[in-house]
Image: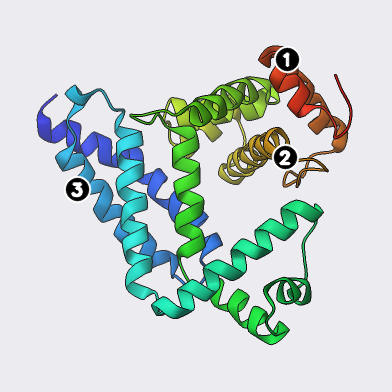
Amino acid sequence: MSTSDERNRLIVENLPLVGYLASETHARATHVPREDLVSAGALALVTAADAFDPHLGVPFGAYARRRILGAFADEMRSMDWAPRGVRSRIKETTRVQEALSSALGRQVSPAEIATTMGVSTAEVSGALADAARTVTTIDDAYDSDLTSLTPLPEESAIVAERRNLLEHAIHALPERMRAIVHAVYIEERPVKDIAEELGVSHSAVSQQRAEAIRLLRDALEQFYREGGEATVSSRVSASVRDGFFARIADAGGSRIARALAPAGVSP
């Protein structure tokens, strides 16, 4: 196969990745037109295929994914209206919101955030509304996804521990979810191919992948909680989630078993 043929094959096979990532990003940042994301992502895919060097040992899917997400971030930043002062207020408000939600184990109201910050409820409501129109939270979310699911050149003890927990958690996922996560993130296969292989719709694969990520985040929340109950983001039943935690604990050793036990209970 010629170099040109290989380039075209990479582009054609990974076009579904552009649409998938564009839809996921648009769901988080609805103010950005999906068609603009698709256009930026398609261009990034083409340039990724042109620049790709297979001798570096990086799978093309992972390489293209980073280039596409980078193009999305650039597109969103170019549309972002928020000046530095507004961004600072948004970041402070959302950090307080996340800290209170984590501590209380539930969603908190603007009034509760305002009381903590010593500002008016109207100011907090305005900051939260502004947050929905900026790319800050999108950037943070994708940075988190990429750093938790892809290797890093340097690993601290904390990152190594997190990676160890994630590896056990991925193996402990329900069978269908585990297969989808492996196909998407390890094999870098297009969602369309996975859906055809499993005999389900594209949206069903996306939903299962999203629920798997939520379960993995629940495991991290439970592991790193500081007393009390961890915040739950997954939508599965409590029994399914408890079984998931139990499988991680069985494979992960005493420290993980202790961390994943219910608050105040020793395994």
Element assignment for label 2: loop
- Label 1 neighbour load within 10 Å: few <14, some 14-19, many 20+: few
| Kind of residue at badge 3 | Thr
Image location of residue 195, percent across then percent down: 55, 35
Q: Is residue 133 visible?
A: no
Q: Is residue 241 visible?
A: yes
Q: Nearer the viewer, residue 185 or 33?
A: 185
Q: Earlier in the sequence, mark 3 or mark 1?
A: 3
Q: Is 107 located above or below residue 161 in the figure?
A: below
Residue topped by disc 2: 225
Q: Nearer the viewer, residue 221 or 188?
A: 221
Q: Residue 254 — which label?
A: 1
Q: Quadrant of the N terminus?
A: top left
Alpha carbons under labels 2 and 1: distance apart: 17 Å
Q: Are marks 2 and 1 in contact (CB under 8 Å)?
A: no
Alpha carbons under labels 3 and 2: distance apart: 42 Å
Q: Are marks 3 and 1 in contact (CB under 8 Å)?
A: no
Q: Nearer the viewer, residue 243 or 3?
A: 243
Residue topped by disc 3: 47
Q: Are marks 3 and 2 in contact (CB under 8 Å)?
A: no
Q: Quadrant of the C terminus?
A: top right
Image location of residue 46, percent across then percent down: 22, 47
| Kind of residue at badge 2 | Arg
The residue located at (40%, 29%) in the rendering is: 151
The residue located at (10%, 27%) in the rendering is: 2
Image location of residue 128, percent across then percent down: 62, 74
